[in-house]
Image (cartoon, coloured by chain):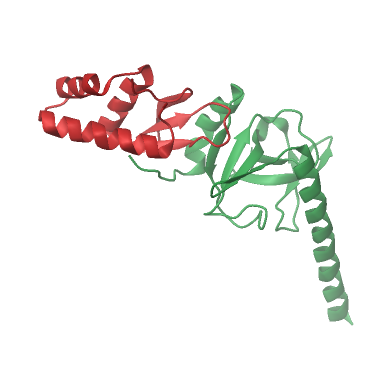
Amino acid sequence: MKRESVKLEELIPTIAETVSHGGVFGFSAQGTSMLPTIVGGRDVLIVGAADSLKKHDIILYRRENGQYVLHRIVAIKKSGYVASGDNQVVKESGITPERVIAKLVGIRKGDTLTECDRRWCVRTGRHFAFLRFLRNMKKKLKNTVKLK
Amino acid sequence: MLKIKDNYIVQNIAGGEYAVYVGTDKNAPSMLQLNGTAAFIFSCLNAGCERDELVSKLLAEYDVTHECAEADVDSFVKKLDEAGVLLK
């Protein structure tokens, strides 16, 4: 018996089935788009049912190209959720509820579990929204200087 | 009596057998990969089983010596205990 990583795409049916029955499912984080909130290769992400989603929640969803990602909701529009990674500037819009598989409910870092409850989501969400604003301003300033 | 904690099921994922946790405990190990023998023992332990009964079941299912079956059962039970999926 050993612990082994399986591709996220291959886990999706199991995750969807587990959370639809009220359970939670843990899998290893990958990638850098949610740094420093989530560290790929180190953290274990615990997801649950994607019910009553709100701004700042972190969701696991399927992109139109079939890729699965875990990003934060930065806005909710009539056309769907708008999501972005905490380490990204680009926003992805039009994420319909049918494409949302699960919601992040916890992060295991070694033996420590961080509960991703509403309070945690809002606090970290606002922090990274401010950082995103600063990064955008920096980018605009750079472009202005270049033009001059 | 040896028994697996509640809410673990054996499932085939991407061609391999896995013990998958489907409960609500965020601290529970989510997934353990199992080979054929391990999946068999895990299924027996899901229902609950004494150690000697488990050895007998393994001997009936696989062509192994009594010593080998005992060693396999003890080793696997120890690993399950270390992973925190065995009821105490």
Locate the C terminus of chain A and report the quarter of the image it occupies. bottom right
Q: Say above or below: B78 vs A51.
A: below
- Taking the spot 63% from the left edge, 52% from the top edge, the residue there is A38
- Taking the spot 82% from the left edge, 39% from the top edge, the residue there is A76
- Taking the spot 35% from the left edge, 18% from the top edge, the residue there is B48
What percent of the width, then of the height, locates residue A47?
Answer: 61, 36
Which chain is drawn using red?
A: B
Between A119 and A71, the residue placed more toward the observer is A119
What percent of the width, then of the height, locates residue A124?
Answer: 77, 50
The number of numbered discs placed on residues in the rendered structure image is: 0
Locate the N terminus of chain A and report the quarter of the image it occupies. top left
Write down the colour of chain A. green
Q: Is residue A66 visible?
A: no
Q: Residue furthest front?
A: B88
- Taking the spot 76% from the left edge, 51% from the top edge, the residue there is A91
Direction from residue B14 to residue A107 in the image, left or right: right
Between A145 and B18, the residue placed more toward the observer is B18
Give residue A46's quadrant in the image. top right
Q: Say above or below: B27 vs B54.
A: below
Q: Say above or below: A146 vs B61.
A: below
